[in-house]
Amino acid sequence: MTRSFRFLLLGLVLSTAAAASTAETGSFGKFPRELGSYVNPSSGGVWDVIKSRAVAEPFNMVATAIFLLAVLHTFFAPKLQQWSHRVERRHRARLESRSVETDRDDDGRPDEVSFAGQTLHFLGEVEAVFGIWALILAIAIVWAKGLQTAIHYLDDTVNFTEPMFVVVIMALASTRPVLNLAEKCLRAVASIGGGRPVAWWFSILTIAPLLGSFITEPAAMTIAALLLARQFYELKPGRNLMYATLGLLFVNISIGGTLTHFAAPPVLMVASVWNWNMTYMFTHFGWHAIAGIALANLSYFLMFRKQLLALERNAADSDAAGEERIPAWVTLVHVGFLGFTVWMAHHPVMFVGGFLFFLAFAQATAHHQKPVELRSPLLVGFFLAGLVIHGGLQGWWIQPVLGSLGETALFTGATILTAFNDNALITYLATLVPGFTEQLKFAVVSGAVTGGGLTVIANAPNPAGQSILQRYFPDGISPLGLLLGALLPTLIVAASFMIL
């Protein structure tokens, strides 16, 4: 990525932060309609409430239909990627038959590319799916409600702080000094098992998710995925083990952030409203999460024991000691920037401004760095931005569903609904339901974090993990493969929260 393009992208991120932070409310009607403004039928069940809200605001059905089409699109993304590869291969074959050079010209311009192939590739990028359908949603809002309403919704109502935070925290967590520090810490744990790949597998999938309670889940996901890529996926394990590990990673990260009240998005949505502090989180959620992670890891180890023990040591790992040493002060500055970003996680102007200072520091210490990777973080931010745009219009049906369920049903319902929407939205909507007892509050939050590994859209950090690891899946990460890989850990975690 050229320097000018990199700073153009940073300019776009900064302008988005400014827009999200300084927008002022327009003079037109509320959109979406406030949930408290609906008049629920005096008799009937939850389905009657949903039907009455659909009649009161017909656009609800349009927004939900577009959202469901976006979800279906994610299932077809791997197939679109395969089609794009075929179109690209045919295009290269035509160029070769015409004796056209396929290398870059001397002036740096790329040679002729296949527009159809590039378009299919873009449509097959899971990170782009919800952004693509957000454009369709915006057109629908303009058509049904007017341009000013669409601008008001995107500029004033939707909160883009979390997508921007994920972009910055991913870029910081994937730097060479931070990754080396995390690797040294996990190497000490893995050394208990002789530094074998199975020991790395255990240490990464156990320690990294729990770090999410302190350095935030997106940072923990980035570090865990990068280390799994180097210490596990590079060894080319079997396909079933690859998906099992991916599902296990997503589930563990989702529950690993519940030891504290400030790191996991679904907990953040309710902590201040329900007065949950760190002591409450650890005594009610933390030990369940630790037990769930340990049991899920042990179960998959027993299931794939032969394959895990057969993996050979990574040559890159054995040579790690020969890498150039990074001065401690450089690492400490990186940790400082990481800590500042976590501290200012709810203030985009502050953490984006801090990131710009970090880029200056990275340039000044370039000989201790690797190039700052922005493509993957920006794609993940684009994914989450599209998701919050759609998610903001789904409360009309999610809220009555949650409010109609008992404790066990609420836990199960929150787990299932999370698979089709971000778990932070599920817990946020729960705060709008009056009369929730402590048992119901526990059920909805534990259910939301339990289901956070079932799909890529279930938990905000999941797109980051998928973006980092998808190169090890030749045909792309299959949503069905991820679902099956996460199913057993999800059931184990559910038992940990509801039975232990």
Image (cartoon, grey):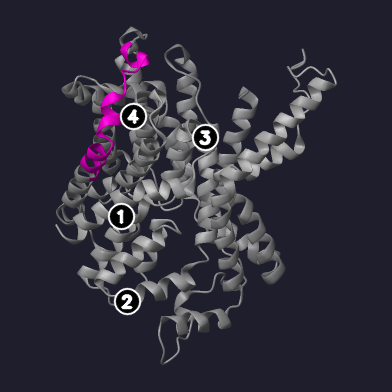
Which residue bears the numbered disc 4? Answer: 336
Q: Amino acid at mark 3?
A: Ser
The residue drawn where x is 66% and y is 66% is 141
Q: Nearer the viewer, residue 43 or 311?
A: 311
Q: Position of residue 469 (x, y in %)?
A: 45, 34
Residue hosting label 3: 376
The crowd level at tag 2 (other Cα within 10 Å; few <14, some 14-19, many 20+) is few
What secondary structure is marked by label 2?
loop
Tell me, yes or no, whether the two marked residues, 3 and 1, touch with CB atoms within 8 Å: no
Residue 308 part of the magenta-drawn span: yes
Residue 352 in the image: above or below residue 411:
above
Q: Quadrant of the N terminus?
A: top right
Asked if residue 361 lies in the magenta stretch, the reply is no
Identify the element where label 4 is drawn: helix
Q: Position of residue 190 (x, y in %)?
A: 22, 24
**Mark 4: which amino acid?**
Gly
Looking at marks 3 and 4 on the same chain, the residue that comes earlier in the sequence is marked by: 4
Mark-to-mark CA distance, 3 and 1? 26 Å
Residue at the limit of the structure toward the right, as seen here = 98
Would you name the residue on which mark 1 appears? Answer: 450
Q: Nearer the viewer, mark 3 or mark 2?
A: 3
Q: Position of residue 195 (x, y in %)?
A: 23, 20
Cα distance in 3D space between marks 4 and 1: 31 Å
